[in-house]
Amino acid sequence: MQQVPVSLWTLVAGIVVTAISIWIGQNHTLMPVQASLQAPLVDGFFNIMFTIAIALFLVVEGTIVVFLIQFRRRPGDDTDGVPIEGNLPLEVFWTAIPTVIVLLLGIYSVDVFNRMGGFDPAGHPHSAAHVAQMPGSAIAATLSDTEATTAPAIAPTIGIGASPQTLNKPADLVVDVKGIQYAWLFNYPDSGITSGELHIPVGADVQLNLSAQDVIHSFWVPNFRLKQDALPGIPTELRFVATKAGTYPVVCAELCGGYHGSMRTQVIVHTPEEYKSWRTENQIALKQNLNQVVAVNPADLSTSEFLAPHTHDMGISAATLESVVIGQK
């Protein structure tokens, strides 16, 4: 019986490994549902890296298994193994191939980064850092004034900005995002709405101006395949287009303190009609709240009445507050 040449076995093994790695690399379910225009770019790059990783795994582990069987010690064989000094062509091969792969992946990753807008996050007239101005009580106004004097009035120069297709075009929606221990605050400068959740319309070019009040946070939406650090004193930008309506988790991906794991919220992608309705409802509620604040004259309130709405935030009961006020009198 004629022995099959090693070169033929190698060719067959290469075809099998290639077919398996490509199939697994393109049909895995490791990533969450795509929900942004940038997600397919990231997934395409990930699938290629995963395909290469599967191929390398099969080659290395398959070779180990074959060698364990082929060159196992036979019963009664006490001879020494064949002395092998080295194999220059093999060493050049397994050094050159990974080098080429890494270089090609590096070039591809730069192209993906550029197409996502990573090369030019700044330079747009609409990307100046906005200061959150929420109509409300005198205390809220004081806080807003303080932030206005301390916030850097410069455009973000770090992050994911406009893609080559939208370069020098203003975003459809600008939202100021502030990370604090341990929550995300979203302010809409054009309407004065402030929310603990991010609401955006599907298909809109959205720009987030990120900042941090205390420590470094990282704004991450897995379904968008986007993540950007929020830095104290350094404004950053994240620009994207959501392509699928739904509710998606927002996670802080930077260890920011003892309750880092609970720093979560969600981004709600509406249809254009739903988003318009949400804005209208919140603007009406904002005006009603402002009218209530204006209608009440703080000078006409007693100390306990003025502080009553804030007792819950201060962690004391109304009875305790009343006794403290009486004691001061």
Image (cartoon, rainbow, N blue to C red):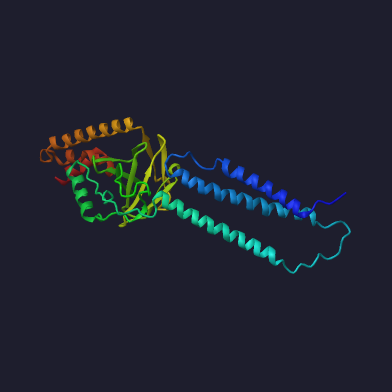
In which image quadrant can residue 76 be found?
Answer: bottom right
From the top left corner, tell me how far across and down residue 143 is, in percent: 21, 49
From the top left corner, tell me how far across and down residue 137 is, in percent: 18, 42
In which image quadrant can residue 94 be found?
Answer: bottom right
The residue positioned 43% from the left and 39% from the top of the image is 35
Above or below, 34 against 151 in this view is above
- Taking the image as shown, residue 246 lies to the left or right of residue 129, namely right
From the top left corner, tell me how far across and down residue 209 is, in percent: 31, 49
The residue positioned 69% from the left and 65% from the top of the image is 89
Q: Nearer the viewer, residue 113 or 326?
A: 113
Q: Nearer the viewer, residue 284 or 117?
A: 117
| Image label count | 0
Q: Nearer the viewer, residue 103 or 305?
A: 103
- Taking the image as shown, residue 258 lies to the left or right of residue 24, namely left
Residue 259 seen in the figure:
no
Q: Nearer the viewer, residue 144 or 40?
A: 40
Residue 274 seen in the figure:
yes
Hey, which residue is sitting farthest bottom in the picture? 85
Above or below, 135 against 179 in this view is above
The residue positioned 73% from the left and 52% from the top of the image is 10
Question: Which quadrant is home to the C terminus?
Answer: top left
The residue positioned 39% from the left and 46% from the top of the image is 263
From the top left corner, tell me how far across and down residue 314 is, in percent: 27, 44
